Amino acid sequence: MWIFAQRGFVSIVAHEDDAAALHVRARFEGDIERLFPGARVETTPLSDYLYRTTIDRDVVARALAAHVRQIGYRNYKATIAEPRHSWYFEVWLVLVEAQGALAPKAVRTRPRLARVGR
C-alpha cells in the first residue's frame, strides 16, 4: 500500500516472517517518523527504499486511522508544500491520464488543469 500523506509518503507491505507486523518503507528522511512517531527507522542504502522500519500491524492501523480522523481540508493538493507538491502532482497527473484512457467513452473527460493544484 502506498500512502501519500501531508506528512510523508510511505510504502507498507507484509512482513515476511511475522503476520502481526508490517514493513513501512520511505524514500525521504523523516517521513516514517512523522507518520509513525516513535518508530525506530533504519537507513538501508542498498535497498529500493532508503528508510525502513517494522511496526506492529495494529499500531499502523491506529496511526493511519488517527490521520484520517484529522482530515479537515476540502482540497488535498492545496495543502501540500513544495517540493512534495510537485511530486504528488506528477503522480496525480499520471493517474488522471490513466483514468481518461481506461474510462468508458461516455464518461471520458479531462479535468480543467487550470483549476487543480494550488
Image: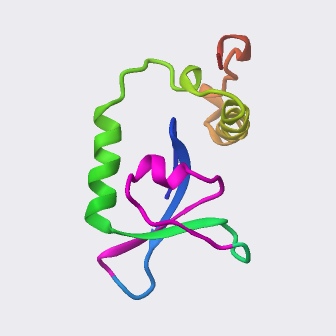
Residue range (magenta): 19-44
* In the depicted structure, whether residue 118 falls above or below residue 10: above
* Front position in the image: 21 or 14: 21
Report x, y in % for residue 104: 61, 36
- Please report the residue visible at 40 percent of the width from the left and 71 percent of the height from the top: 22
Question: Residue 71: where, in percent of width, then height?
Answer: 36, 28
Residue beneath the point at 73% across and 11% down = 114
Residue 100 lies left or right of residue 70; in this view the side is right
The residue furthest top is 115
Give the total of numbered labels.
Answer: 0
Residue 27 figure quarter: bottom right
Please provide percent x and percent y for residue 48: 70, 70
- The residue that appears at 73% across and 32% down in the rendered structure is 86
Residue shown at 43% from the left, 48% from the top = 35
Return the residue nearer the eye: 66 or 42.
42
**Residue 109 position in % (x across, y down):** 67, 23
In the depicted structure, whether residue 76 falls above or below residue 114? below
Q: Is 107 covered by the magenta stretch?
A: no
Indicate yes or no whether the magenta region holds residue 23: yes
